Image (tube, rainbow, N blue to C red):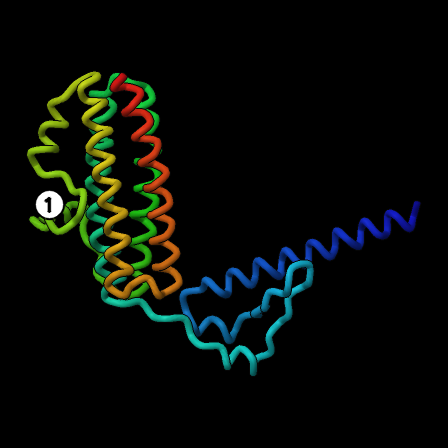
Amino acid sequence: MFSSRRRVLTAVAIAAVTAVAALVAVLQLTGDRPDERAATRVVQPGAPGQAGRTLSAAEQAQLPPPPAHTAADTQFMQRMIAHHAQALEMTALVPDRAESREVSLLAQRIETSQRDEIAQMQRWLTERGEQVPGPHAHHAGHDAAMPGMLTPEQLGQLGRARGAEFDRLFLDLMIRHHNGALTMVEQLYAAGGGLEPASDRFAREVNADQAIEIKSLQELLAKLSG
């Protein structure tokens, strides 16, 4: 009995060590600043079922630094902040106009994710000494350069709609808006951006989140359209 218990405890200990090693490795591989690497313990993940290996200082010094951010990354973050800001304008119209509770709940989810991503982009720009656009930057006349952005006329139409008409129009316009964000991610990589680990990770998260929300928007629109 004691032998079995000892084997269980040993297996748990090994699993814990392996999990910690993997976590440290992930944190190091996704870090944004090369100067942090030399002062931090770096663990190279092992093969499946095997523990990782701590790299020596000499081995760490041989690691190539992660790519720095580019002008394409900066422009992507600045423009996506403006893009998200307009989505928040759209969701702000929902409480007084929507008829469907499902539309209201979906709008709340979109608002939460967009606000969180705006904060992430602002932090990314600030940490790199880049200009952070103001909250109304998308009103500066550059909307046409961003895919999916609503025109003032479309925003006005949405603001005048009520009830079931608003629900369908909101869903339709938000689908277009989200598809525009996916296009902006494609443009980032086409312009040579997304090589910096942090910008690449964020762009992929935006792409995944927006794609999931587009599917939800489309399903709800089909349901409400009968």
The residue at the point 84 percent across, 52 percent down is 7
Q: Amino acid at mark 1?
A: His
The residue at the point 67 percent across, 63 percent down is 51
The answer to whether residue 69 is seen in the rendering is yes
Residue placed furthest toward the right: 1
Q: Quadrant of residue 49?
A: bottom right
Q: Quadrant of residue 162?
A: top left
Q: Quadrant of the N terminus?
A: top right
Q: Position of residue 17 (x, y in %)?
A: 68, 58
Tag 1 residue:
139
Camera-side residue of 185 and 56: 185
Q: Position of residue 171 (x, y in %)?
A: 24, 29
Camera-side residue of 222 and 41: 222
The residue at the point 69 percent across, 54 percent down is 16
The residue at the point 11 percent across, 23 percent down is 160
Q: Position of residue 87 (x, y in %)?
A: 23, 38
Q: Position of residue 190 (x, y in %)?
A: 25, 61
For residue 121, above or below residue 193: above
Q: Quadrant of the C terminus?
A: top left
Mark 1 element type: helix
